[in-house]
Amino acid sequence: MFDAVDRRILSILQDNARTSNAEIARLLEMAPSAILERIRKLEHRGVIVGYEGRLAPKAIGLGLTAFIFVRTDEPAGAISTGRVLIGIPEVQEVHHVAGEDCYLVKLRARDTDDLARLLRERFGKVPQLRSTRTTIVLGTLKESAQLALNHLDEAGATHDARERDVQGRGV
């Protein structure tokens, strides 16, 4: 499970993955070696799965965001088409979904001409793909890879409920 220190480390790293171990240690008033050990354990457990820089899509010429619902002819539960879709460089996310569609794909393109080319040349050549429905994003109000951490607790209770319990006992 997660204790308060783990939650704080995860929060700090989500806010800025470039925060040094020394800085995290300073913020938490702990030894850098202890922080490094905790981060390594979180990585080993698969809680921290990577570190990446976030780029501004428009700044690098990818101003169009599209969500594409994909239907396939593959048997139920098969994900071979999904494996092909993740190989398309412009694709950022591929979700295997329940419902009428099989996958929900998020991609970035330069413009509508580029999107049309991708649908025709890349998606159109996927063998099991039966159809697509595309939604173009007009504007993004929020986009984040950060996860809410306030529910994490070593005993499974919410953080807020545990704090109320501790305060009520005068601990």
Image (tube, rainbow, N blue to C red):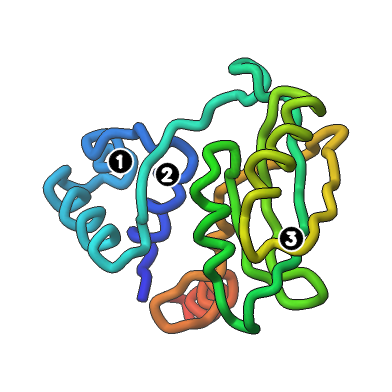
Spatial CA distance of label 2 from label 3 is: 36 Å
Give the vertical position of 78 relative to 25 (above or below). Answer: below
What element does badge 2 sit on? helix
Name the amino acid type tagged 3.
Answer: Val
**Residue lying at 83% horizontally and 48% vertically, measured from the top left:** 134
Mark 1–mark 2 CB contact (< 8 Å): yes
Which residue position holds label 2?
12
Mark closer to the chain start, 2 or 3: 2
**Spot occupied by residue 93 in the image (x, y as percentages of width and height):** 59, 51
User: Residue 35 appears at what percent x and percent y?
Assistant: 21, 50
- Please tell me which residue is depicted at 64% across the width and 50% down the height of the picture: 125
- The foreground one among 157 and 82 is 82
In what element is the residue under mark 1?
helix
Q: Earlier in the sequence, mark 3 or mark 1?
A: 1
Q: Which residue is mark 1?
A: 24
Location of residue 146 in the rendering, given as x and y in whole percent from the top left corner:
55, 49
Asked which quadrant contains residue 71, the reply is bottom right
Taking the spot 51% from the left edge, 31% from the top edge, the residue there is 54
Q: CA distance from mark 1 to mark 2?
A: 7 Å
Closest to the camera, between mark 3 and mark 1, is: 3
Q: Is residue 27 left or right of residue 44?
A: right
Question: Cα distance, mark 3 to mark 1?
Answer: 43 Å
Q: Quadrant of the C terminus?
A: bottom left
- The circle drawn on residue 70 is 3
Locate residue 61 relative to residue 26 in the image: left or right: right
What type is the residue that disc 1 sits on?
Answer: Ile
Q: Amino acid at mark 2?
A: Ile
Mark 2, mark 3: which one is toward the viewer?
3
Q: Nearer the viewer, residue 99 or 72?
A: 72
Q: Is disc 2 surrounded by few (<14), some (14 to 19) or many (20+) residues within 10 Å?
A: some
Badge 1, how many Cα within 10 Å: few under 14, some, many 20+?
some
Q: Is residue 71 left or right of residue 88?
A: right
